[in-house]
Amino acid sequence: MRHFGIIGYPLEQSFSAKYFNRKFAGEQIDAEYSLYPIHADEWQQDGGGKVKQLINTLDGMNVTLPYKQAVIPFLDSLDETAKAIGAVNVVYKHIGYNTDCLGFMHSLKPLLRDYDRKALVLGTGGASKAVCYGLKKSGITPTLVSRTPMDGMLAYGQLDEKTMKEHTIIVNCTPLGMYPDVDACPDIPYGLLTPKHLLFDCIYNPEETLFLKRGKAQGATIKNGMEMLFGQAQAAWQIWNS
């Protein structure tokens, strides 16, 4: 039997085990997929020992928040995409891959309009790196937005009317609004949104986050992360079973 799994924290709402175990059963592959929640304290205390063990013993692995960058030192190498992005969400034979960007762009592209030239990307973690990579590949200029911005980034308080008008795409790569904290949302000026805006949330649970609801109320086009999730999972499947 082959063994697969996912590391991250928390994992209670992860769809991965159900999705991959169903695919293994449907294609009559003798394999199982399990959840491996690792709290940050545990990671720090054992120096990533559990992660090293899982990389050595599992036949394939997914990586989710908050370890898409932290896992890199434990791998032998990265494929070109993961290296360019600087984040990993799939591991196979000690090599790191990034399929998040594929899932994201597959989901976003049908919604793009001729005037979409600039995007605000909320958050600076592994997911935002993949999103920025995909946007650049599509000719869209991303600008990161953070509570503690560094050079080349914006703070939430800098999102004025001019900035919001120029950036017609807004992508939430933060965990704000994810179940069970459904009453949270990124602190952007929602009153400046218009029907010309496109709001994409990498979160898929709940189906419509407060971020998306507030954008919808302003007439903006909205899309959640479910299709992105399936897209990156299908790409991971191909890596493990090609």
Image (cartoon, helix red, strand yellow):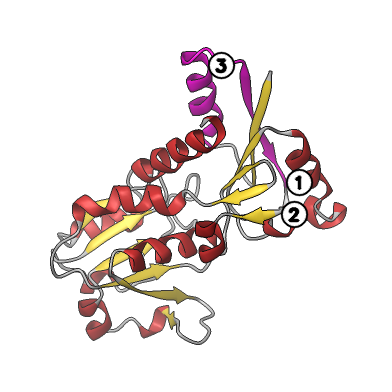
Q: Is residue 165 left or right of residue 152?
A: left
Residue 194 in the image: state x and y as whole percent.
16, 68
Q: Amino acid at mark 1?
A: Val
Q: Secondary structure at mark 2?
A: helix
Q: Amino acid at mark 3?
A: Ile
What is the CA distance from the residue labelled 3 to the residue labelled 2? 28 Å
Residue 27 vs 81, above or below: the answer is above
In the rendering, which numbered label is found on residue 223? Answer: none
Q: Amino acid at mark 2?
A: Phe
Near mark 2 (Cα within 10 A), the count class, few <14, some 14-19 or many ≥20, is some
Residue 59 vs 141, above or below: the answer is above
| Precedes in sequence: disc 3 or disc 2 | 3
Q: Residue at x 51, y 69 (%)?
A: 124
Question: Where are the magenta residues, as a range?
Answer: 14-38
Q: Secondary structure at mark 1?
A: helix
Q: Is residue 117 left or right of residue 97?
A: left
| Precedes in sequence: disc 3 or disc 1 | 3
Near mark 1 (Cα within 10 A), the count class, few <14, some 14-19 or many ≥20, is some
What is the CA distance from the residue labelled 3 to the residue labelled 1? 25 Å
Q: Which residue is mark 1?
A: 51
Is residue 19 shown in magenta?
yes
- As drawn, the residue found furthest toward the top would be 28
- Circles 1 and 2, Cβ within 8 Å, touching? The answer is yes
Q: Residue at x 32, y 46 (%)?
A: 208
Q: Is residue 154 left or right of residue 74?
A: left
Residue 170 in the image: state x and y as whole percent.
31, 66
Nearer to the camera, 214 or 70: 70
Q: Is residue 16 left or right of residue 207?
A: right
Q: Which residue is mark 2?
A: 74
| Precedes in sequence: disc 1 or disc 2 | 1
Q: Which residue is mark 3?
A: 29
Q: How many circles with numbers are drawn on the protein?
A: 3
